[in-house]
Amino acid sequence: MIDDLEELVKAAVGEVFSTMLAQQIEPEPPNSPVVNGDATIAGSVGFIGNLTGIVYLYLPQGFAVRLTEKLLGISPQSVESEELVNDSVGELTNMVVGHLKSRLSDRGRSCVMTIPSIVRGTNFCIEPVSSTIRRLLTFRSHEHQVVVEILMRPDTSS
Amino acid sequence: MGRKILTVDDSKTIRMIVARAFKKYDLEILEAQNGVEGLAVATREKPDLIILDYTMPIMDGFEMLTKLKSDPELKPIPVIMLTAEAGRENVMKIAKQGVRDYLIKPFKEELIIERVARVIDLKPRGESVSKVRRYDDALDILVVDDKPAIVEQIAGGLKETNWKVEGSSTTSQAIERCARKVPDIVLISLSLPENGAFTLFQMLRAGARTKIIPVFGLSVKTAAEDQARATQVGFTGIVTKPIDFEDVKIKITRALGLDTSFKYFSHKDGLLHLKLPAAFTPSVSNDIVTNLRNQLTEAVESGFDKMLIDMSAVNNADITLIKLGLSSLQLCNELGLKAALIGSPAVTKECRNYEETKDWRFVATAEEALTLMQSGTAVAA
């Protein structure tokens, strides 16, 4: 297993938010409670190869719209469709996973990324099969909580 | 519209970010959502640059790049990969396919602009319609020669212009100078030691700010091999020693597309006035012909209906002069301008001897020409 997986994810999220959004984001203390109940958009990107798994990036819906405005430099009125928000969240997730994948690739753990997909909903949770390794990291960007969930198949290569 | 950039990415977000980054430049941004669409747009539009994503549905960036590089027509189009996957293995794989550069997501807008500017010339929107530079504008000419006498000679030969000549004796000095201030023209001695001229030329062409500067090679007439090599690698032209400064002025004028029309055309007493200089050479004639149609059309559009062709300073009616006179009169006829000719005694006399010009009627002064045109008398039969 990757010992510093959580640190790699934190670095990836920080890099994507600061570079693409000029937005501060800080990791919350371990085991911070996950706020649930709000309308949420989840972007997901999988990776297959020496390491196999999937990463979810959960964003409150209103925050996702504001990030889309910021990412594209457009006014709130211009975010005319859910599709544009979905695409932006998908791309942010893609960048986080790409950053993570690159670090893993440099350690000889090569894998291929999947195309991003989006899930919208309220009060939903992912229930992995018992053999899957699960890591849940929470972040805070201003008043919003951002959650990253990593599901990985146990490493059998070493 | 200037150049075209094709951005191939399945994410509308990335395509919008790229389009926004280049909004202030005179560029047409084309878009495609995957490799198949990308190849179709590239084939149809022949963009100047492709910004290509790696992971895409239908056809990914790697496959598109492979197909692009195997097509003789599309192969020369430079490609910058824009990918979220930056591992060493991936970068090596991309590099082997001959991409010009690669950018890792996340990326800052400034970074993508900088990388693109290394490949194509980015002109701010609106600049392309700005005023054309004139022959009498100030120009900055850098002469790279290890013989100071040559630099002095060139400065002296161009002293009647507003062009400032500065010398660098080594390639490193020249590079420093270009980094500090980009010159308008560079003249490099092809005999610089250690292949210096060609090394410097490659460095200038690799620089985002210097890659479009016209560069001339300076060489003795007999150094044919150096001249051929310079031409082959892409020098704008060759200036041979001993230097003919009229030739240098013409070469620089052409390389920079300088407007020279004011040297010959003016508006005077309600007339469009074309004044031929005493040193009327084939080059001068070419210069006038280049501007002729535009000048006459603009004059007609501005309400002028008369033109005076003044050959009074010219002392020889050779074939170049006759051709210019004939094409000017023909164009006046096409555009409905009345024309009159002023000739020196020698030109007036010689023109009577040629079939094409024997009917030209010359007058001595502009006043006389005006009276003639107002009376409706034809200038030439």
Image (cartoon, coloured by chain):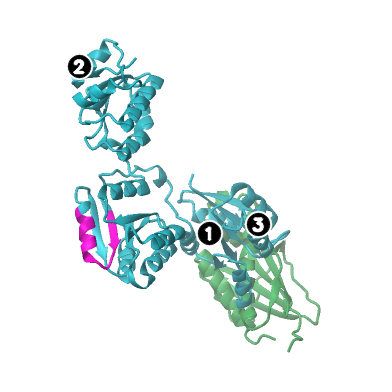
Chain colours: A green, B cyan
Is the residue at mark 2 from the same chain as the one at mark 1?
no
Q: What is the three-letter code of the residue carrying label 3?
A: Asp
- Is B57 in front, or is B63? B63
Q: Position of residue A98 (x, y in %)?
A: 63, 71
Q: Secondary structure at mark 1?
A: helix
Q: Residues within 10 Å of mark 1 (few under 14, many from 20)?
A: some
> How far from the left and from the top, in percent, is residue A122?
71, 63
Q: Amino acid at mark 1?
A: Lys
Q: Are marks 1 and 3 on the same chain?
A: no
Q: Are marks 3 and 2 on the same chain?
A: yes
Q: Residue at x 64, y 80 (%)?
A: A104
Q: Which quadrant of the figure has residue B316?
A: top left
Residue beneath label 3, please?
A: B71
User: Which residue in the structure is indicated by mark 1?
Assistant: A70
Residue found at the far front of this picture: B353
Q: Is residue A20 visible?
A: yes
The chain holding disc 3 is B
Determine which residue is flagged by label 2.
Answer: B368
How far across and down, in percent of the image, does residue B274 sit?
Answer: 27, 29
- Quarter of the figure that contains the C terminus of chain A: bottom right
Residue displayed at 50% across by 64% down:
B108
* Cα distance between the residues tagged 1 and 3: 39 Å
Could you tell me the amino acid type at mark 2?
Answer: Glu
